[in-house]
Image: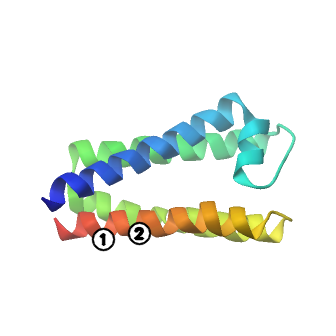
Amino acid sequence: MLSPVAYTLAVVLDLLVAFIGARFLLRPEAAATGYGVPARPSAYLTVKGLRDLSYGILGLALIAFVSPYAAAWFMLVVALVPLGDTLIVLRNGGTRAVAFGIHFATAVVVLVSAALLFAI
């Protein structure tokens, strides 16, 4: 019973990250506003988009072709990204609601996903 939940959560998170990356590539201003720190389109937003898109695809590839254990380690390490995003939003004038309600909460969900994948 744990396997479908673990895999589903991991796949949903990876797809969400890939979607966020694609959004930063296609609509950088809107994506930056949703991130919590409004910005004009720049190379940095493109870099963030490519990073997120790549992380999402890598997570899906690990689930599809390697093992739940490898995917769990990936999720554990990649949880550092939303934790860092929390600090970035707080240090750059974003609201605490966005920092904790979006980024920190995402880190917690990613860590739960890692724990579920380790448990398989």
Q: Residue at x 72, y 31 (%)?
A: 27
Identify the colour scheme used: rainbow
Residue 45 lies, in percent from the top left, at: 74, 43
Can residue 54 be seen?
Answer: no
Q: Quadrant of residue 2?
A: bottom left
Q: Residue at x 52, y 62 (%)?
A: 106
Q: Is residue 14 left or right of residue 94?
A: left
Residue identified by numbered label 2: 111
Give the distance between the C-alpha atoms of the residues marked 1 and 2, in whole angstroms. 6 Å
Is the residue 65 above or below the residue 113 in the image?
above
Residue 91 lies, in percent from the top left, at: 81, 71
**Front in this rendered view, residue 74 or 120:** 120
Can residue 45 be seen?
Answer: yes
Task: For mark 2, give the secondary structure.
Answer: helix
Q: In the orientation shown, which residue stands out farthest toward the top?
A: 26
Residue 95 lies, in percent from the top left, at: 79, 65
Image quarter hosting the C terminus: bottom left
Q: Is residue 86 left or right of residue 74?
A: right
Task: For mark 1, give the secondary structure.
Answer: helix
Residue 115 image label: 1
